[in-house]
């Protein structure tokens, strides 16, 4: 007989009567829906042409609130294994330190809600933690496999939208890399080509792993369609992270197929990635896209000019006297070097969540700086930037060195538990999610957090620690 609280009905006491299996099913669906809602929310400013970027976080916020409730239920029902308490507690410390950083920040409102258009303030960090802990509490391969399908579906959705951006130049903030250079770069529903590159890297790697672990013809077809489209589109991000992510996905995917001793014919899937990627380069070199006739990377122009400066007014334009915007190495070297200077001056609590541009402001561009919006001020500060495309440095700069240490320790702890669980049980879902988490951790060395990619990363990080045997 089902338990009841006082004289209430059985239906109203679903929490009391929720089994671990039902909890896992509900949690996995909430996580998958969060991934899609986050992408679909980003479609609003693209479709309307209005810069209503505050709406891009609606989907993630809805999922985050539900996951906070699920975390409370999981804790109450003791669905969180003692074996994963260390990384969970470290994430909690990082969140607590972010609160301290917020209290010592330039702007409490931005620290809480994030810079307009980025939306990665304290609330976003709270939601990321809830995704992580919710995924930790999931039990069963069926629920975790649903998350992998969700990642594939999200990659496919982003790729389809990107095709319109690439061939028509519509619904995009990145059709131009400068006033004169038309490239029709793809951003999908990920807000930036760099962030799309990370999303598609994980999607491609997941597709490769799907060939090794998914059963059924339909699943295989789903994987091949996703890997072909994602590999084609990722080259149109014109980014260093896109190239690195693509190579990582292939290497890790092949390693997965070999490790689990899947049929060697699955290795043919590699051509499903390489051929579309090569076709992308050929199309550009034939002068069929925009007004360019040779393929090259446009990292600096996209991340500094098209995204930070033009799209969301988060920084000033680049200073050509200080950085060669067409030299990819010089762009990242300059960002990292300047970030190190900011860290040295704000090592303990950082600048405050999502407030990297604040200490760089030297020109208010207005007679009333006290009442001016930060996005109306930042654009007057030439050479400033709002993101370091290295999440470890970005975390240290905005939330302090203790937060960066907590971030690194969490990732190391997650990977140790994930690989340890695979070694014990040889569970292929565990191995897949651990490898995907490792790819994300490596990509964070050359890119930064975003509401498009980071929720997926933390979901994978939590799910890879699940003990398939259910030991707690």
Image (tube, rainbow, N blue to C red):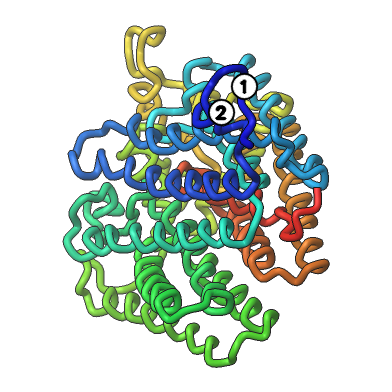
Image quadrant containing the N terminus: top right
Up the image or down, 284 lies above or below 344; here it is below
Residue 18's image quarter?
Answer: top right
Marks 1/2: CA distance?
A: 7 Å
Closest to the observer, 305 or 327: 305
Give the x, y percent position of residue 205: 53, 69
Identify residue for label 1.
Answer: 5
Picture residue at 33% right of the left edge, 22% below the top: 376
Disc 2 crowd, CA 10 A, few/some/many (<14, 14-19, 20+): some
Q: Is residue 140 left or right of residue 108?
A: right
Badge 2 element: helix
Picture residue at 76% right of the left edge, 52% below the top: 412
Disc 1 crowd, CA 10 A, few/some/many (<14, 14-19, 20+): few
Identify residue for label 2.
Answer: 13
Q: Is residue 161 visible?
A: yes
Disc 1 to disc 2: CB gap under 8 Å: yes
């Amino acid at each position: 007989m089902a338990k009841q609280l006082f004289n209430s009905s059985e239906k109203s006491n679903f929490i009391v009567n929720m089994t671990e299996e039902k909890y896992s099913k509900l949690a996995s669906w909430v996580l998958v829906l969060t991934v899609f809602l986050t992408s679909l929310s980003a479609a609003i400013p693209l479709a309307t042409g209005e810069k209503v970027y505050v709406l891009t976080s609606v989907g993630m916020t809805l999922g985050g609130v539900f996951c906070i409730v699920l975390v409370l239920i999981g804790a109450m029902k003791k669905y969180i294994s003692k074996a994963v308490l260390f990384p969970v507690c470290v994430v909690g410390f990082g969140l607590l330190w972010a609160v301290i950083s917020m209290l010592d920040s330039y702007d409490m409102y931005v620290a809480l809600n994030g810079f307009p258009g980025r939306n990665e303030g304290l609330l976003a960090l709270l939601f990321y933690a809830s995704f992580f802990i919710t995924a930790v509490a999931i039990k069963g391969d069926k629920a975790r496999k649903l998350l992998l399908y969700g990642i594939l579906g999200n990659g496919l959705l982003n790729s389809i939208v990107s095709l319109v951006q690439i061939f028509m130049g519509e619904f995009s903030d990145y059709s131009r890399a400068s006033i004169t250079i038309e490239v029709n770069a793809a951003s999908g529903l990920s807000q930036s080509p760099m962030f799309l590159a990370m999303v598609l890297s994980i999607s491609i790697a997941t597709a490769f792993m799907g060939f090794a672990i998914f059963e059924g013809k339909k699943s295989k077809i789903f994987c091949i369609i996703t890997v072909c489209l994602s590999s084609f589109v990722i080259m149109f991000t014109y980014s260093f992270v896109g190239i690195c992510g693509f190579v990582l996905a292939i290497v890790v995917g092949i390693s997965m197929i070999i490790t689990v001793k899947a049929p060697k014919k699955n290795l043919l899937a590699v051509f499903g990635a390489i051929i579309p990627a090569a076709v992308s380069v050929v199309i550009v070199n034939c002068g069929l896209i925009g007004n360019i006739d040779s393929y090259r990377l446009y990292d600096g122009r996209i991340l500094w000019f098209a995204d930070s400066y033009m799209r969301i007014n988060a920084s000033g334009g680049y200073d050509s006297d200080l950085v060669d915007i067409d030299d990819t190495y010089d762009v990242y070297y300059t960002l990292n070097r300047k970030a190190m200077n900011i860290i040295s001056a704000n090592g303990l609590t950082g600048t405050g969540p999502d407030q990297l541009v604040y200490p760089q402001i030297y020109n208010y561009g207005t007679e009333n700086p006290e009442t001016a919006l930060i996005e109306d001020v930042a654009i007057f500060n030439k050479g400033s930037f709002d993101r370091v495309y290295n999440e470890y440095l970005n975390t240290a700069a905005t939330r302090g060195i203790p937060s960066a240490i907590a971030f690194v320790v969490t990732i190391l702890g997650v990977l140790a538990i994930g690989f340890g669980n695979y070694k014990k049980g040889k569970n292929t879902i565990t191995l897949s999610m651990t490898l995907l988490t490792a790819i994300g951790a490596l990509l964070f060395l050359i890119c930064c957090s975003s509401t498009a990619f980071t929720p997926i990363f933390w979901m994978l990080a939590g799910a890879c620690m699940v003990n398939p045997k259910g030991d707690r």
